[in-house]
Amino acid sequence: MEPRSRSGVTSPDSTRPNGTSPPLLPTISLVIPCYSLERLQDILSLLDSVERQTHQLDELIIVVQRSEELRSQLEARLADSSTPGWRLIFLELEPQVSRARNAGIVKARSDIIAFVDDDAVLSEDWAEKTCETYALYQDIIGVAGAIVPLWDNPAMAWFPRELYWMLSCTYWTSPTPVRVRNGYGANMSFRREAFASGRGFDDSVGIGGWGTTGWRGVGGEEPELALRVVQETERAILYVPDIRVWHRVMSYRLAPRNLARRAYWEGRLKAILTRRFRSESSVLATERSLLKDIAVGHARRLLLLIRHPHTALKQQAAISLALACVAVGFFAGKLSGLRGERDRT
């Protein structure tokens, strides 16, 4: 599938014959899961960015989990919102992103159902470019947008781009739209058809909320759903770099213990996906491509070692730690799967 313009979304007029009408834009719902009063200021910043959109949302759904005080604060804020069609859902269940997103899917009524994390901020043309992309690419089932790290401290910018996936940020560098396996929950969307027949995010591979103790659970609900949707609909997911959000990265997320835990569970996830999608030869294609990028980046870090040795050594240490922990997690997951299969026979 070739992009219809350089950006894929910014020049729809260039793809139409003279005198024809622009493509009819689909309606869009945005689902925001949240669970902690500690993130109230982040959520308020996100809501501000929603109200600054150049293309108004058709529906805004905020799913609050467990925190009565957070619900009260957001209800007060939304009462003055300029965004029509907003609703707030409250869940008493233990906070889990998958459950919150699924609750939002059930309530959403638009053609496009989009998701963003509660600590992200949308670019002003986010909704406009998302809707234009779906209008231009009729054969896609989902869209992954760019997720740019918003560092709590500029000194954190040493972190290597090849490991941005550990922060739920995008490491892809393509300047034009390309097909990808999956997006991340901080900036992804699907056509309504993706959730037909009761499809949704799988709790069993989902995560709880982030905290100072780090990653909780496998954290694979996004790629697992994407693989199912693409397999069953035979339609692609498109990465569009012009659909941007900024995702807050707090300093504790770069602590070695948190990075190790995150990488370990990523390895466990990949073992689960290879079992669930045995017939799909491309399940680990993203990881193979990433390993190539890391190898290419190694030469770049050798040059960096000369100019900024401290930064180069920190990057190399983080990459070595991540690769080692992913490998341990992957083989642990494989062994766990083999034990499970023996127990069933």
Image (tube, rainbow, N blue to C red):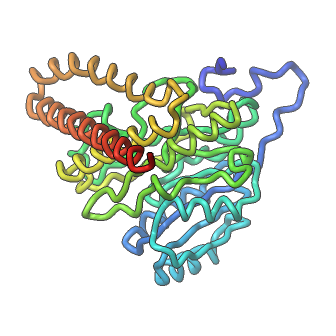
285 or 30: nearer the viewer: 285
Residue reaching furthest to the front: 345
Query: Count the marks: how many?
Result: 0
At x 68%, y 64%, the residue is 83
Residue 118 x/y as whole percent: 47, 60
Q: Is residue 299 left or right of residue 40?
A: left
Left or right of 199, for residue 157: left
- Confirm whether residue 222 shows in the render: yes
Query: In what quadrant of the picture does the N terminus appear?
Result: top right
* Residue at image coords 69%, 27%: 11
Residue sitting at x 24%, y 54%: 251
For image coordinates 52% across by 59% down, the residue present is 98
Q: Position of residue 205 (x, y in %)?
A: 45, 52
Viewer-proximal residue among 59 and 180: 180
Above or below for 5 versus 111: above
Taking 301 as reference, is 30 above or below it?
below
Q: Is residue 175 left or right of residue 230?
A: left
Quarter of the figure with the C terminus: top left
Is residue 47 in sight in this rendering? no
Q: Is residue 33 above or below residue 36?
A: above
Which residue appears farthest toward the right when viewing the image?
A: 19
Q: Nearer the viewer, residue 147 or 275?
A: 275
Q: Pinpoint residue 343: horizontal percent, then vertical percent.
A: 39, 50
Q: Nearer the viewer, residue 197 or 251?
A: 197
For residue 12, side relative to residue 336 (left or right): right
Residue 61: image quadrant is bottom right
